[in-house]
Amino acid sequence: MGCAQNNKNSQNKANTNLSSQNTPNTMEFKKLTPEEERVIVFKGTEAPFTGKYENFYGKGVYVCKRCGNPLYRSEDKFDAKCGWPSFDDEIPGAIKRIPDADGMRTEIECAKCGAHLGHVFMGEGFTPKNIRNCVNSISLDFKPADQAVKADPVIKTDTAIFAGGCFWGVEYYMKKAKGVKSVASGYTGGHKDHPTYEEVCAGRTGHYEAVEVVFDPTQTTYENVARLFFEIHDPTEWNHQGPDFGEQYRSAVFFRNENQKEVADKLIALLKEKGFNVVTEVKKASTFWKAENSHQDYYEHKGTLPYCHGYVKRF
Ligand SMILES: [Zn+2]
């Protein structure tokens, strides 16, 4: 566990980034009405079937009522018949997920200003993405498509999830790939909600250290990203990479649809033909829990290079 013990345990792993206490106060905020404040600031909920956007399907972008940050696209809105606007995807990086104070649900906030939006639910089967962002209308403002939201071109992105050992190294190399918009380090495939780094490392949760790669399909493909994944970690090692040993370091592709599964199976077959004894698991994606902030952009912050990962041409 070289990577894990020498470096990670010496990090300050205070788990405080999960709260939104540090809302920047220099930001330009819209003045809120008392009802807006009740929901947005004090995390209230508007009555179902009453909100402005509950039964509204204009084409455009939904922005944060308080700070104007673009949050959701009309293309991702669907009718869940639950009484609140529902979206099965978000604009990448726009939303922060945090454990709700009720200990059960996952709250969603504007990633820019911390405004309370609602809750996110997974696995309900409403749409193929299987996610429902349940959002209060009052937390949103709608910008019609013909009034372009400035500096935020609407790019339809796709997402890939991989586990290939210590997530710092996988994240480092994935970020540099063409067409990749963002990479987050996190945990997936286990059985505990909101796992912490300590729990995952102790092997108590069944989670894999994983990365969530958001890419622009007009600039790259899932196959390109998956090929890179197989070349920046050793897919012939089941539960260790470099100096790191443990089940959280298992090699796995978490597919989000049939196409991704086919690509992963194809690449594994290709590598096996070349004589690599690939042990990478191909599993259906489940909830991706973003890791604590101290684990994001780790090498950029540290100013060093990964030593548990490196690029090896395999295809
Ligand atoms: Zn905001």
Image (tube, rainbow, N blue to C red):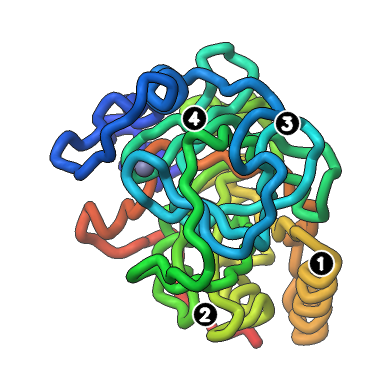
Query: Percent position (x, y) of residue 216?
Result: 54, 76
Q: Is mark 3 within 8 Å of ligand 1?
A: no
Q: First in sequence, mark 4 or 1: give its number.
A: 4
| Picture residue at 34% right of the left edge, 39% below the top | 66
Taking the spot 34% from the left edge, 54% from the top edge, the residue there is: 297
Q: Which mark is residue 261?
A: 1
Above or below 217: residue 238: above
Q: CA distance from mark 3 to mark 2?
A: 51 Å
Kind of residue sitting beneath label 4: Ile
Query: What residue sits right under mark 2 in the picture?
Result: 312
Q: Nearer the viewer, mark 3 or mark 1?
A: 3
Q: Position of residue 163 (x, y in %)?
A: 61, 55
Image depth: mark 3 or mark 4 in front: 3
Q: Residues within 10 Å of mark 4 (few under 14, many from 20)?
A: many
Q: CA distance from mark 4 to mark 1?
A: 29 Å
Residue found 41% across the figure and 36% down from its top: 292
Nearer to us: label 2 or label 4: 4
Find numbered disc 2 in the image and state the secondary structure of the residue it sits on. loop
